[in-house]
């Protein structure tokens, strides 16, 4: 059995953290400076992590490659499993001609590109995040925007920016539920704390989204809509997280946002006309379709919503989980010891692979695809074309996701992630700010707020107790800060690129585009946490 050591370079935490961050520097350099495709950066980053683990942390080779394989397997299932069927559902709608009716029905509500982005990227995307998560909202919403005439780059950028506000409560509240399980802190208080950190920022996300895409001129014309959408979502997010729990927070918030947008379009129209760069202008009214045709065209997405919600119901989830297979990952499970101060005592590091093939959100997407084929009754040739197109879109993105998850899991099991976490925790009184950045780093690495909470949640509590800070606030800060790392994780970028059919050469451009917004918004979360920690500590749950 091998024990993690968090200061392998001359016993220095600072030097060890610099070396531990080499895989991250590799990713940033290749994507940001050299403008390499995400799959190339992912593979080189994985190679750097392997060298650091073997050469610096002295992790045995058997454990090193077992950790890589474990991460890659997690990338294939459940993440790529969700992505595949979400994109296939969109392709099926396109190949059968039904997506043209979907486009016309949205154009009938509003032809304004800004309002279309709010409806689909923010409001509908938040609904899919709350119901499914794990890449599904970006895949579905980005594909829909591309179909509506947005350029692939802007479709991807809009959806990545929009998929921030709902992430902490995604997939029926799984990130917060995981955080409570990892830390042993009460779920109700954690849910309330995350809601109190995220809701003030959520108010401004729709306005920020439009501002980023088109500047003040774009925002000025639709300011009533962005305010209504943001207030509706944030208000519901705050109420549900504080008084109902984490499970329905995103569902209720997204429904409130959708309702506010739809009602507003019925009584108010923007006075100006604005077209995002790269988006086709709407030059004529869309054709009117009978109600029956519109319902049939929207049926695949309606079935997706119904299936995902059914999969999330406790009684159904219990039944579906009865078919789950949990495997002790060969050569890795309980073969590594974690040590203080990352944990409270020396503990074996579990490595259990959960093959929840029936209860996974991707399976709900698959069932919705099968039901959609019954409703649409497409020719076999159209189904085959949709399947082939989906496969061709996903080749390199699957490689990206697998390599980056292999990198993240290797850093976790080698102790490199623990080193970086301890470096953040050494910031003392400024830790509430850096606590949010620690969560941001975790999601950048793993692509998942759930995984980041499992990774750093306990470290946040240990550090908070050592510094005399509120442990519930610090744990909640991890989850809240993490949402802003979602837009720059290579998994998210790969999903967005695959869903929109974006050229691989644009992936590095997309990373550079989202990076500055990610850092800025994560810093805003950090300032909110500082406010609760030192200015109004009575406002944070204890």
Image: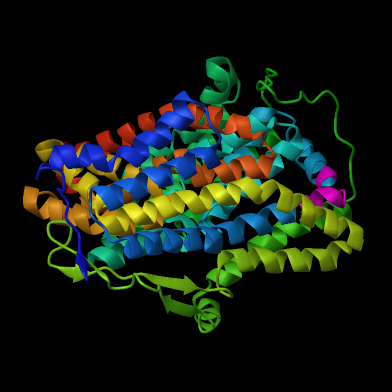
Residue 391 vs 424, above or below: the answer is below
Closer to the camera, 418 or 55? 55
Q: Position of residue 235 (x, y in %)?
A: 43, 46
506 shown above or below 458: above
**Rendered location of residue 241, percent (x, y):** 38, 56
In the picture shown, does residue 113 fall above or below 14?
above
Left or right, residue 224 beside residue 265: left
- In the picture, the quarter occupied by the C terminus is bottom left
Residue at position x 61%, y 30% in the image: 505
Answer whether residue 92 is magenta in the image: yes
Of 475 and 37, which appears nearest the observer? Answer: 37
Left or right: where 140 falls relative to 374: left
User: Which quarter of the rendering shows the N terminus?
Assistant: bottom left
Q: Residue 381: x percent and y percent?
A: 90, 58
The residue stretch that appears in magenta: 91-100
Q: Give how far across and how far down residue 5 sits, in percent.
A: 16, 55
> How many labels sit on residues?
0
């Amino acid at each position: 059995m091998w024990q993690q050591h968090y200061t392998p370079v001359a016993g220095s935490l600072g030097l060890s953290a610099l070396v531990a961050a080499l895989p991250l520097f590799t990713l940033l350099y290749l994507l940001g400076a050299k403008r390499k495709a995400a799959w190339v950066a992912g593979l080189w980053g994985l190679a750097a992590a392997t060298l650091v683990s073997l050469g610096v942390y002295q992790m045995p080779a058997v454990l090193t490659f077992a950790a890589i394989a474990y991460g890659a397997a997690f990338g294939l299932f459940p993440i790529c499993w969700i992505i595949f069927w979400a994109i296939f559902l969109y392709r099926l709608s396109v190949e059968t001609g039904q997506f043209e009716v979907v486009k016309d029905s949205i154009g009938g509500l509003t032809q304004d590109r800004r309002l279309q982005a709010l409806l689909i990227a923010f409001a509908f995307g938040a609904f899919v995040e709350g119901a499914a998560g794990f890449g599904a909202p970006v895949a579905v919403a980005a594909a829909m925007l591309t179909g509506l005439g947005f350029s692939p780059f802007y479709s991807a950028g809009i959806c990545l920016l929009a998929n921030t506000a709902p992430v902490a409560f995604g997939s029926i509240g799984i990130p917060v539920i995981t955080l409570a399980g990892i830390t042993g802190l009460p779920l109700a208080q954690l849910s309330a704390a995350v809601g109190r950190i995220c809701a003030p920022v959520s108010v401004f996300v729709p306005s920020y989204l439009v501002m980023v895409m088109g500047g003040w001129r774009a925002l000025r014309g639709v300011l009533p809509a962005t305010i209504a959408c943001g207030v509706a979502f944030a208000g519901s997010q705050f109420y549900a997280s504080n008084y109902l729990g984490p499970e329905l927070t995103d569902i209720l918030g997204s429904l409130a946002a959708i309702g506010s947008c739809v009602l507003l379009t019925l009584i108010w129209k923007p006075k100006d006309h604005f077209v995002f760069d790269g988006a086709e202008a709407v030059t004529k009214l869309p054709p009117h379709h009978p109600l029956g045709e519109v319902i049939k065209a929207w049926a695949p997405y309606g079935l997706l919503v119904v299936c995902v919600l059914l999969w999330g119901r406790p009684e159904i989830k219990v039944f579906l989980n009865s078919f789950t297979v949990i495997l002790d990952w060969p050569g890795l499970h309980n073969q590594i010891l974690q040590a203080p101060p990352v944990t409270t005592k020396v503990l074996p590091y579990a490595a259990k692979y959960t093959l929840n093939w029936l209860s996974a959100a991707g399976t709900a997407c698959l069932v919705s695809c099968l039901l959609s084929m019954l409703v649409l009754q497409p020719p076999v040739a159209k189904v085959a074309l949709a399947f082939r197109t989906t496969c061709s879109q996903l080749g390199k993105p699957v490689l990206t996701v697998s390599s980056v998850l292999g990198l993240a899991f290797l850093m976790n099991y080698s102790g490199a992630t623990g080193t970086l976490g301890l470096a953040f925790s050494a910031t003392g009184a400024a830790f509430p700010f850096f606590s949010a950045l620690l969560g941001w780093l975790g999601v950048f690495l793993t692509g998942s707020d759930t995984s980041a909470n499992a990774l750093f949640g306990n470290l946040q509590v240990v550090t908070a107790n050592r510094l005399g800070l509120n442990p519930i606030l610090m744990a909640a800060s991890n989850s809240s800060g993490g949402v802003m790392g979602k837009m720059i994780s290579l998994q998210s970028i790969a999903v967005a690129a695959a869903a929109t059919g974006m050229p691989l050469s644009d992936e590095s451009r997309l990373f550079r585009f989202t990076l500055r917004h990610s850092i800025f918004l994560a810093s805003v979360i950090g300032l909110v946490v500082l406010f609760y920690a030192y200015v109004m500590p009575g406002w944070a749950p204890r």
